Amino acid sequence: MITWTFISFVVCLILGVPIVIAIAVATIAPGLMDPSFAANGQFILRNIIAGANNTPLLALPLFILSGAIMSKGKISEKLFNLFAYMIGTRTGGIPCAVVVTCLFYGAISGSGPATCAAVGSMTIPLMITLGYDPVFCAALVACAAGLGTIIPPSIPFINYGVATNTSVADLFMAGIIPGILVALCLMVCAYIYCRRKGENKQLIAENCKKLRSRGILRVLIDSFWALLTPVIILGSIYSGIATPTEAAAISVFYAIIVSMFLYKTINIKDLVEVFRDSVRAYGPLCLMLALATAFGRVLALMNVPNMLAAFITENISSKIIFLIIVNIIFLILGMFIDAGPALIILAPMILPTAVALGIDPVHFGIIMTVNLCIGFVSPPFGMNLFVASPLVGKPVMEIGLKAIPFMVAFLVALILITYIPGISLLLVGS
């Protein structure tokens, strides 16, 4: 049954069936093959309902919604103007400002592709007018947008937390330093590129002069409400005022207030459109999480997690080698499958073995997520590449090749995060 379960799942993926349907087929396959198997229709339905009846799961659609509202409200432009004002005239300053914008916007959207679309649509045309290579601009934004899934509130962290019963609040806190580390590595890479290739200092100076003519106070006030967003979200969680789910609800109301009444960048008609598009985005994702719960229970009935743990324990006794193998597996998976499904399906299966080897569940969640972030820009199916490609009118593979130095920078950060647990765990429980 195990073999046919995975064959049915893989065949569905090869045929291009939506992954939510592929999970459903793999979930019901054992019961169809063996009517005496415990995972009958009633068992599966009961576990789907149990998977959906999960309070932390509510944070997922709420954070997606608040990020969509902020995106429509052009919050990324407010953030970029502030960072460009501060470091724009330095060597590599504009690309570094893009990275920092992605870092802060990630704390609003929680999504890599959403960050790529919101920041890229505003910064890429500007960078091109300042003389930067369009392919470089697209590669930079595609890679930096991966920060949206590391910096809290991260959608993959919620997926991992729900799938493995790990504290979402701890995952949020653990993602702060790794996210900053990745951003610094990307900024160093952008600086080296600009030093080697050069920049049009005259155009950059003219642009920054226009920005600075507004004065730092005006620029700071204009970006203040955008900068306050992550403070309100994370502050409400770690002060004990709200749970992650309640903070997600707060973020929706805050996004509406800021975008409609303070910045006045959206209206009621825009808000209705955002609500409609958000439901289309998170509906399948929430269904997939509920189905993944049932799928996990079916795998447990077939003893798959224990078999996998026994195989790894018998063949791998070193934590270092185990982590190397996990990184390689997830780097490859990231090229073909989105972070959400990968975490939902595989995290519950691999985590028990990781814990047995002395790896903290929160640290392991960070490792898996950072790996899958690199997958966002890994050809042939890196999602951020497909988001960035239309913004410059260049082929996905061309952007992917240009992104290789940034991917190397990401890998350097990944190695440090993997083998120095304190990077992830320093703020947890403090």
Image (cartoon, rainbow, N blue to C red):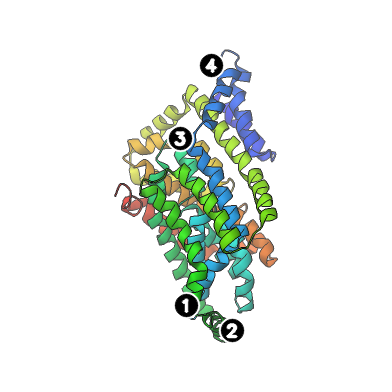
Report if residue 324 is visible in the image: no
Residue behind mark 3: 348
Q: Position of residue 397 (x, y in %)?
A: 64, 60
Q: Name the amino acid type tagged 3.
A: Pro
**Labels 1 and 3 touching (C-beta < 8 A):** no
- Say what secondary structure mark 2 lies in: helix
Residue 303 lies left or right of residue 353; in this view the side is right
Dot placed on the residue nearer the N-terminal end, 1 or 3: 1
The residue mark sitting in front, 1 or 3, is 1
Residue behind mark 2: 203
Q: Which mark is on residue 67?
A: none
Q: From this view, report whether residue 388 is shown above or below residue 203.
A: above
Residue behind mark 4: 38
Residue 245 lies left or right of residue 270; in this view the side is left
In the rendered image, the quadrant that contains the N terminus is top right
* Other-residue count near label 4 (Cα within 10 Å), few / some / many at <14 / 14–19 / ≥20: some
Residue behind mark 1: 216
Q: Residue at x 48, y 61 (%)?
A: 104
Dot placed on the residue nearer the N-terminal end, 4 or 3: 4
- Say what secondary structure mark 4 lies in: loop
Dot placed on the residue nearer the N-terminal end, 3 or 2: 2
Report if residue 189 is visible in the image: yes
Residue that protrudes farthest toward the front in the picture: 261
